[in-house]
Structure formats: structure tokens, C-alpha cells
Image: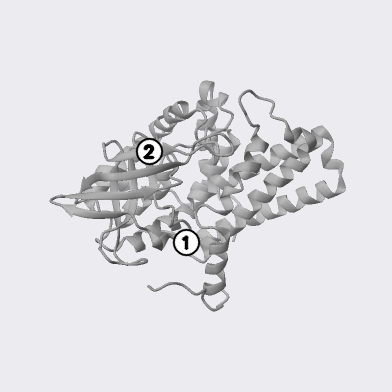
Amino acid sequence: MDVRDRPEDETFRKDVRAWMADHVVGEYAELGGRGGSGDETFGFQTRQKWERELAAGGWTCLGWPVEHGGRGASIAEQVIFNEEYVRAGAPGRVSVVGEGLIGPTLVHYGTADQQARFLPPIVAGTELWCQGYSEPNAGSDLANVATRAVLDGDEWVVTGQKVWTSLAHQADWCFVLCRTEPGSARHHGLSYLLVPMDQPGIDVRPIVQVTKTSEFNEVFFDGARTGVHNVVGAVGDGWRVALATLGFERGVAMLGHQLSFRREFDRLVAMGHENGRAADPVIRQRLAAAYGELCIMRYNALRSLSGVDGPVAPPEASIAKLFWGSWHRRLGELAIDVLGPDSMIVRGAEYELDDFQRAFLFSRAETIYGGSNQIQRNIIGERVLGLPAEPKGST
């Protein structure tokens, strides 16, 4: 695998860098690159404006096919864009779920009518999406979904509860995995519905986290309705579509996430030199190890995406998720040690955490959401190493 830029890639990189230099200014530059994972509520309205700025420049949905509003960009070009985006200190994206998850899912599994209705507003940055997967009893064990939907004329009526729904309080639409076949169990009888959020049958309740922010929400469906045509894939085939969406989540969409780790790491190294903690041999060794693992993370992501057209399926996706989630949690712990006693002090008003304190607290969740470390190890053990499957309930 040759990770060097080709001549055409160098031209593309210069174009991206020049556009970012001209546009990451004023209120966008003032955000200082904030708004990423664990910080999604910061500067939200400004970041919504930035999404439309990106769209006007033709920088949204790069990898989507041209016929669906994208650029048909290669994997190399998407990597370059994400690298330059992070280097420019551009604001955290607010349309990650739309552009990175539901959009590619509709490109591959949606009907022509669904694509015509839902893809253009994502490209334009004018409609936001959230993901209705996890439930109180169906987190990493997603097949235990209990939220149900029944047909009433030409509409589906949805009843149930979703939890840990990122930015549900800001979203216009939600893709909901629910049970449409009464009496079905596990991954059978599930369907993948597109549900509008602005209606009387939906109650969104923000969850205040240890960081004192509220990116996540509980969502209660009490007779919420959506059109019969808003099923992605066949009725009862929701499990296959849902897994495809998870594959997109761990594919190209993760590149920007990983590159933001590099920016975070660089800031930590600078802090260590500033306060002298980087001179400690143990701290220095831990920083060196973190850098090596960060390089491994990037190269493995590039290798796993080589030649990909569609979702990245387990076990490759599970290996990547296990690796980056664990790495970032360790980096959060390392940040606290580099800061030393100062890490215990909140210097801002009303529990205003700094970047490193926020990373330490939020990174605990990254080994849980999107499939916990234990689940990822099960997948790797069974599908890569050939170990006996963990005992499960009836299917």
C-alpha cells in the first residue's frame, strides 16, 4: 500500500487547502475546531451555518456518486479532504449521521423516490438526522430491539423507546430499527423506518452526562407516524440494512474522527513540553507508544478501505472499533497524567471543562457505544480466530 500522494492527489490537496484557508475565518475560525465527538453541542448554530458553507463550495458528501449529488471522490481524495479539514481547524461537522450513515445506506438500499426525497437536503446541509438503534435492553445486543411498528392504512405507527440517540433534539429525521412482525425474535421481523421527528408522537429528553453536556437523548415514540413508503429495504429485512449502516459508520466516516485524534495528540505533546511533564521517562514512553499506535490506526484504516465500495463489514470494522476506542480511552488517561494536579481543577465557570478533561471523561463512552469492547472481541474471536460462539438465546 503506497500512502504517498499521486500528482493528481497533490492538486486536489492544494485545492482543499486553499478553500479552507479562504473560508475557515471569522466565526468559524473562532470555534477552534471544536464540535467533535463528545463536544457536539458546542457552537451548534454556527456549525449549522458552516455545513451550508461547505455545501455551497461542493465539499459535502464527497464520496457519494455524482448522480446523487456527490463528487464520486476516491478513497484517497476523501482521506486528503479529512486530513486538510483537521489541519485547517475547521468546525466539527453536524451532518455526520446524514452524510456518513443514512445517506450511503439510501444510495445502496433506498428506492429512487427515497433517494430523490432525502439525499438532496443532506447534500445541501439543510436536514439533520439521528440514529434510532439502541434501547434500554438493546444496546450492544441490538437484536433485542423491542420498539414496534404496525401498519394503519398507509402509515406505520411506531411505539417504543430509544436511548443514547445523538443530537435527537436537533434532528429533523430519525432512521429507526423496529419490530414489524408480531411475535418475532432477535434479528427476525425487524424493519428500517425513516421517521420525521417534528410530530406529537415523539418526546425527546436530553441526557445530562458527566461532562455536563447533553449530546445524547432518550426518545419516546408514542404513536408516532411515518408513511408506508418510508421503509428502507424490504419489510422484515431491517437487520441486514441496519448492519450495513454500522459498516458505513466504521468506514470512511471514521477517518476524520481518527485525524482529530492526531490533533488532540499533538496538543497533548505540546502541553507536556510546556509544563515539563514530557521530560519524565515514563510519560515520554507512553507518548511514544500512543504515537506509534496512532500511526497503526491510520494505516490500518487506509488498508481496510482500499477497494471498498459499500459498507465495511465485520470483522475488519470490529478490529478498527476495538482499537480506536481503547486507544482514545488510554489517551484520555495519559492526558490527565500529563496535566498532573491541574487536571483536577475546573478553571472555567459552571463546570466548563478543558479539552483534555472532556476527552478523559467522554472517552470512557467510546469503548461502549457503537458496540462495546466485549462485543467486538466476541466478533473477532468467532469470525477471525474461529473460537466457539458465546452461548446465546433462541433465534
Residue occupying image coordinates x 76% and y 48%: 287
Element type at mark 1: loop
Instruction: Give the percent coordinates (x, y) of residue 256.
Output: 54, 45
As shown in the figure, which amino acid type bears the numbered disc 1? Gly
On the question of residue 380 being in view, the answer is yes
Residue to which mark 1 is pinned: 307
Disc 2 is placed on an element classified as strand
Q: Tell me if 71 is positioned left or right of 114 in this view.
A: right
Q: Is residue 291 above or below residue 211?
A: below
- Disc 1 versus disc 2: nearer the observer: 2
Image position, residue 345 (x, y; %): 72, 31
- Label 1 neighbour load within 10 Å: few <14, some 14-19, many 20+: few
The residue labelled by disc 2 is 204
Q: Quadrant of the C terminus?
A: bottom left
Looking at the picture, how far across and down is residue 61, in whole percent? 40, 43
Image quarter for residue 239?
bottom left
- Give the crowd class for mark 2: few <14, some 14-19, many >=20 residues within 10 Å: some
Residue 34's place in the image compared with 162, above or below, is above
Q: Which residue occupies 76% across, 37% down?
A: 339
- Is the C-beta separation of discs 1 and 2 under 8 Å? no
Say which of 117 and 11 sits in front.
Answer: 117
Residue reaching furthest to the top: 26
The amino acid sitting under disc 2 is: Val
